[in-house]
Amino acid sequence: FVFQIPTSGVLVLTEEEKRTLISEGYPIPTKLPLTKIEEKNLKKVRRKIKNKISAQESRRKRKEYMDHLEKK
């Protein structure tokens, strides 16, 4: 899915985004528009989450493949 950062209104973050922002030491932005730094940090965190999900999926597929080979 595609992340879009709205230009005005209320910023809605997922729990995962909030957790990652905190663990990375970034302040959680509350209002829009975001500053350039907030926008950069949020993009970095979202990319990190996306990479984490991708790695989990890759490990799952590899395990599935190995299980299949073992059954043969």
Image: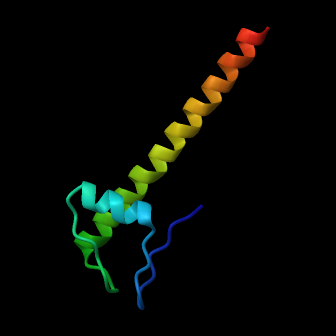
* Residue 55 image position (x, y, % from top left): 50, 37
Question: In x, y percent, where is residue 14?
Answer: 45, 68
Relative to 40, say whether 66 is above or below: above
Residue drawn 43% across the image and 52% down it: 49
Task: Tell whether 31 sits left or right of 69.
Answer: left
- Find residue 72 and report its image quarter: top right
- Residue appearing at x 56%, y 64% in the figure: 2
**Left/right of residue 69 with respect to residue 60 in the rendered view:** right
Q: In which quarter of the view is residue 38 placed? A: bottom left
In percent of the image, x 51 and y 46: which residue is there?
53
Q: Is residue 63 above or below residue 23?
A: above
The residue nearer to you, when weighing 60 against 3, is 60
Residue in view at x 29 percent, y 76 percent: 29
Q: Is residue 54 left or right of residue 68?
A: left
* 40 lies above or below 63: below
Q: How is the image coloured?
A: rainbow
